[in-house]
Image (spheres, grey):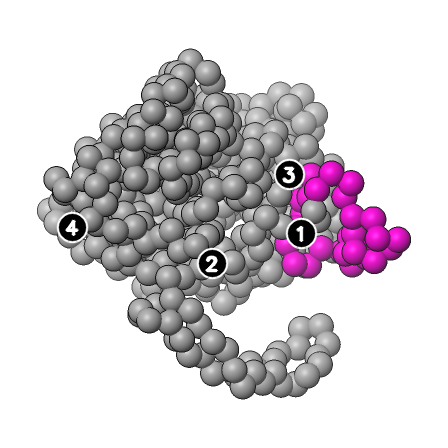
Amino acid sequence: IAGAIVKGIQGEDVSAPDKCVAGFCHYPGQSQPVSGLERGAMEISERTLRSIFLPSWEAAIKEGGALGVMATYPTIDGVATHASSHILTDILRHEFGFEGLVLCEGGGLSTLVYEGFAKNQKQAGILALNAGVDVGISYEDAYQKPLLESVREGLVSEDIVDRAVKRILRQKFRLGLFERPFVDVKLAEDIVHRKEHQDIAYQAAKEAIVLLKNKNQLLPLSKDIKSIAVIGPNADNEQNQLGDYTSINVTQHIVTILEGIKSKVGGNANVRYVKGCNVVGGDLNEIKQAADAASQSDVAVVVVGENEWRTPGKKGTVGEGYDAATLELTGMQQELVKAVYNTGTPTVVVLVNGRPLATRWIAGHVPAIVEAWCPGEKGGAAVADVLFGDYNPSGHLSITIPRHVGQLPVYYNYPPSKKYWLENAWGKPYVDMEPSPLYAFGHGLSYTTFKYSDLEITPGQTGPGGKVHVNVTLTNSGNRAGA
């Protein structure tokens, strides 16, 4: 995946007008912090660093030739990354042969102060520069006037400053910025949001959708349906379909799920829409209205999940640096789903979210569940295509969804002791729930069926780092096309 990203962004010639530097975030990782705080310290060993965290970076740099990385916020085994020459120079440049720029995180130089490595910004600048941070991306004193003072006072070598400057200039030469310093406005106007890009967004949204559950083939829905209740805080929310780092002033039209459903049934069906509640908080309670709408309809589609942190006046649940103590639905959303389900109307839950959600009750009761993630500007059309069978879902989970945050980690290569104590030793799994995931990596249903036969794996056994060849005959054994 890392190699594909570099190829797509940098191509064969990074100076080409449609290419730029692939800047990977956040080196060497930000995903295993203490207490689940994204920017919190990471207590990981050198073995874990090299076996879990670094392989993707090594592939991006050695194989792909990536020219940009951003240092991560956390300390790693007690050393702030922005001050770690071991991570930013020894491993990155000497081992991986990195030739590009190391950027600090936004406000990242300040981590050296609040982590206790530097008593002030002046000291932080010295430590970061020596460690190998080339560029400060935000206005921090560490890389401004105090750094000039440090050079004049002999606290930092001018050669080290020159090293960073040379790297910046070399990057500009690679990009051809001295020959072409200005953007081609006409080209930008022609390219941005052109139809081909919208079509790719539409196709990507469809392919990413995962059908998690479909009891008794409730889906796909018939377009001849007479009435449908569309309920939930994410049913008609443009911003929440886009995810983090999008403006609150998006000028392009966003197809919401409500709009997508209406376009499928046209004027033939009575579409009843009730928001029901907000993603966070209890300041909106339309649960009774939602239940009433569902009870009067042939089917109910409830769209819940997460919200984007830039929504005005709202506290977000998905986005960089916005952590949740649990993976459950926030606010009154589960109560909303229960109320709709209890009406007896066939219910479909659509999840719009940026992280796996532990929806145990929904998984155990609601007959059909669709994972849409943050499906983008054409997301509503894509979800409607899946709901009404114009697109046969083929997405499979690229992560494992746990039953509860207490199960983490649940990825395949956890230490053998976890499997042993959960499954074998005296028959004692968790006392309060099943030890298995809610949905395992690779899970994903279809509207057709497939058969596998003639499986061959060679060799039958291999050691660490070995390669195997898998041959299998795959047959679509259902009555409709599928992938």
Residue marked by disc 4: 194
Whether tag 2 and tag 4 are in contact, CB under 8 A, the answer is: no
Residue marked by disc 3: 405
Direction top: furthest residue: 283
Q: Residue at x 27, y 47 (%)?
A: 384
Inspect the image, locate mark 3, and give the three-letter code of the amino acid beneath it. Val
C-alpha distance separating marks 4 and 3: 41 Å
Is 259 placed above or below 107 here?
below
Q: Residue at x 14, y 42 (%)?
A: 268
Q: Earlier in the sequence, mark 1 or mark 2?
A: 1
Q: Residue 397 in the image: state x and y as whole percent.
A: 49, 55
Left-right relation of 351 to 247: right
Query: Which mark identifies residue 444?
Result: 2
User: Which is in the foreground here, disc 2 or disc 3?
Assistant: 2
C-alpha distance separating marks 1 and 3: 12 Å
- Judging depth in this view, the residue of 363 and 342 nearest the camera is 342
Query: Is residue 285 visible to the viewer in this orientation of the structure?
Result: yes
Whether tag 1 and tag 2 are in contact, CB under 8 A, the answer is: no
C-alpha distance separating marks 2 and 4: 32 Å
